[in-house]
Amino acid sequence: MGVEIINITDLGDERIDMFARLTEAQLRNRLHAEQGMFIAESPKVIRVALDAGYEPLALLCERRHIDGDAADIIARLNECPVYTGERDLLASLTGYTLTRGVLCAMRRPVPKSVEEVCRNASRIAVVDSVVDSTNIGAIFRSAAALGVDAVLVTQTSCDPLNRRAVRVSMGSVFLVPWTWTNTLDNDTQDAEHHYINKLHTMGFKTAAMALVDRSINLNDSCLKSEQRLAIILGNEGDGLPTSTIERADYVVKIPMRHGVDSLNVAAASAVAFWELGNES
């Protein structure tokens, strides 16, 4: 059997719920991870996902792209259904104009363990409670480009497979190994389970990006000399919890001029990764 092209005329068609009516939480499906999905948007991003081995489930495509921008993608889908319609109809269905006219529903992979993701890494990033999807996408794009081997994401952060995060990352979220991690602050009984403690057991030194009295400059030579280093990035508004900063081996700042106290977390990540990431 080849690819089935299905023309959409009814906005209530249940077969396309994944593209239109399921929330991000429903797509993620925490209770049944094996049933989880995510949406990749635009031909370029979908190609990156396919090249990285992600499993496609269905495609939603403007009719004009079937023999155009999406033709090579459709040729790789085997028996996956391709739902199609005119641009205005699909925009009414999804609530937004499709980027480059193509969406792909893909199988969400089973999360890896922290140990597996970090096993061969010398430079990792920890994203702690970063909630904006644009910032998450930008952090992953910088991580892929600037020598970060893996990313850990706390459960209090935005999902890296959020549709907008995936698009902003330009598919970089498929290129950098990542997984979820926990942080249990303000609970001395669970202090040993904080991700910093886990990183220490794996031989990582930790560098928390924060402005405190003991902060050292990002270009301090002691940071680059560390064989295994985790760069910790905090929430857009509140930064990192005090308890996390206190547990870190280093607290690091980016030197500023003109009285500017800090950068957006996505911009700060790019500067930090450029300075501290692997050079090869």
Image (cartoon, rainbow, N blue to C red):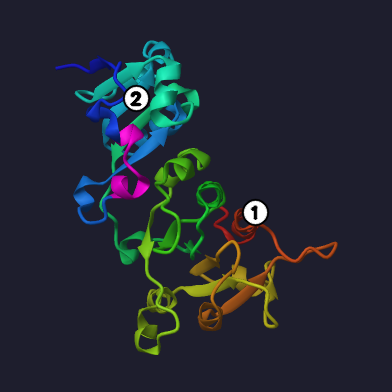
Hey, which quadrant is residue 175 in on the image? Answer: top left
From the viewer's side, name the closer residue of 3 and 270.
Answer: 3
Give the left or right position of residue 31, taking residue 22 as reference.
left
Q: Amino acid at mark 2?
A: Leu
In the rendered image, the residue lying farthest to the left is 1
Question: Which stretch did the figure color magenta?
Answer: 18-28
Q: Earlier in the sequence, mark 1 or mark 2?
A: 2
Specify whether residue 175 is painted magenta. Answer: no
Residue 180 in the image, given as x and y percentages of width and height:
36, 61
Q: Is residue 62 visible?
A: yes
Residue 60: mark:
2
Q: Main secondary structure of the magenta part?
A: helix
Estimate the spatial distance between the alpha carbons at disc 1 and disc 2, rounded to whole Å: 33 Å
Badge 2 crowding class, 10 Å Cα cut-off, few under 14, some 14 to 19, many 20 or more, is many
From the viewer's side, name the closer residue of 171 and 236.
Answer: 236
Residue 20: mark:
none
Residue 161 in the image, given as x and y percentages of width and height:
39, 47
Residue 22 in the image, given as x and y percentages of width and height:
31, 41
Q: Amino acid at mark 1?
A: Ala
Residue under numbered circle 1: 267
Specify whether residue 19 is painted magenta. Answer: yes
